Amino acid sequence: MSHKKSVTQNLKEETNTALDRTQAKAQEAKGMVKEAVGKATDNPKLKVEGKADQAAGKIKDAVAHAKDASRDAGEKIHKELHKKH
């Protein structure tokens, strides 16, 4: 039995992490807008919400990058282990 992932499965995983990164960046941008509006309107609650959204977006982006790196490392190890000598 082969443990090799199908091309479709790899594409699905890559698409999911790309979507995760896109959503994370959107959350960061939303946070920047909220913070700017909070500053412009002197609304401390909105400023704090904006900073929180930015931090959450950065964390989600880091997690998505870690998933990519983990998958890539796993694929590299798999290739090395199954090289024909």
Image (cartoon, rainbow, N blue to C red):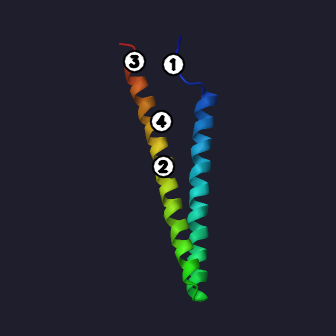
Question: For the residues marked 3 and 2, what is the alpha-carbon distance in whole angstroms?
Answer: 30 Å
- Earlier sequence position, callout 4 versus callout 2: 2
Left or right, residue 64 beside residue 33:
left
* Residue that carries the numbered disc 2 in the rendered image: 63
Amino acid at pointer 4: Arg
CA neighbours of label 3 inside 10 A, class few (<14), some (14 to 19), many (20+): few
Left or right, residue 76 beside residue 17:
left
| Circle 1 or circle 3, nearest the eye | 1
Asked whether disc 3 touches disc 4, contact meaning CB atoms under 8 Å apart, the reply is no
Question: For the residues marked 3 and 4, what is the alpha-carbon distance in whole angstroms?
Answer: 18 Å
* Horizontal and vertical percent position of residue 52: 52, 68
Question: For the residues marked 1 and 3, what is the alpha-carbon distance in whole angstroms?
Answer: 14 Å
Amino acid at pointer 1: His
Q: How many marks?
A: 4
* Residue that carries the numbered disc 4 in the rendered image: 71
Asked whether disc 3 touches disc 2, contact meaning CB atoms under 8 Å apart, the reply is no
Asked whether disc 1 touches disc 2, contact meaning CB atoms under 8 Å apart, the reply is no
Quarter of the image where one finds residue 85: top left
Viewer-nearest residue: 80 or 45: 45
